Image (cartoon, helix red, strand yellow):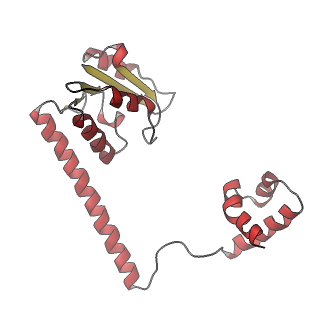
Amino acid sequence: MKIGYARVSTRDQNLNLQIDALKIAGCTDTYIYKEEISGVAKERPQLRKLLEQIREGDVVVIWKVDRLGRSLTDLVHLVNEIQGKGAGLLSLNDNIDTTTPQGKLTFHIFAAIAEFEREIIRERTNAGLAAARARGRKGGRPKGLTKESKVKAAAANTLYRQNMSVSEICNTLSISKKTFTSTFVLRILDE
């Protein structure tokens, strides 16, 4: 069975082009999963439903690979999950069809490039950290508050003790509520 997946990032975009292409490829309305959600969202409910639905012999049909995966690494993970269930992937605009030997080869080349890219990034990161340590630099954030933050924390403390609301304190000091609660509240409670 052919199962389609269509995704757009915003409500301003339209799924019609993708849905029309999926129907021409043999997907029926019943088996087309549609999402209006950013590709960077970790939880995509319709994609999760699709992955739960597929069975051995099914083919997941997409308009383009960027509609499925957030990154090449994410795409490799999803395709491995699809293939682990005995199903295939067909990308209409990228000429990838993992139900054929050529399509599997193309996909495995993508996967190898993704793994190579991860290893190169890891090597560069480790080399940069080693070079910084050799020059005496320690990694991570500086410990404690900056002078400006200490002044704002003291002001926040004073305003807080005068029963000013958190919103009013944040507006007065031009800080976010998150900054107030994560940084200044700790200082207030320590005193």
Image location (x, y in percent) of residue 64? 30, 32
Quadrant of the rendered structure where residue 162 is?
bottom right
Q: Is residue 104 above or below residue 128?
A: above
Q: Is residue 104 above or below residue 151?
A: above
Quadrant of the rendered structure where residue 166 is?
bottom right
From the viewer's perspective, tell me whether residue 160 is left or right of residue 57. Answer: right
Image location (x, y in percent) of residue 50? 35, 27
From the viewer's perspective, tell me whether residue 19 is left or right of residue 188. Answer: left
Q: Is residue 131 above or below residue 78?
A: below
Q: Judge by depth and name the residue closer to the eye, 53 or 89.
A: 53
Q: Look at 33% across and 25% down and name the residue there.
A: 53
Which quadrant does the N terminus fall into? Answer: top left
Q: How many marks?
A: 0
Q: Look at 25% across and 15% down and name the residue there.
A: 26
Quadrant of the rendered structure where residue 186 is?
bottom right
Image location (x, y in percent) of residue 173? 77, 61
Which quadrant does the C terminus fall into? Answer: bottom right
Q: Look at 42% across and 38% down and name the residue there.
A: 39
Image location (x, y in percent) of residue 29? 36, 14
In the current view of this chain or complex, which residue is farthest to the left? 101
Q: Look at 43% across and 85% down and name the residue there.
A: 136
From the viewer's perspective, tell me whether residue 82 is left or right of residue 150. Answer: left
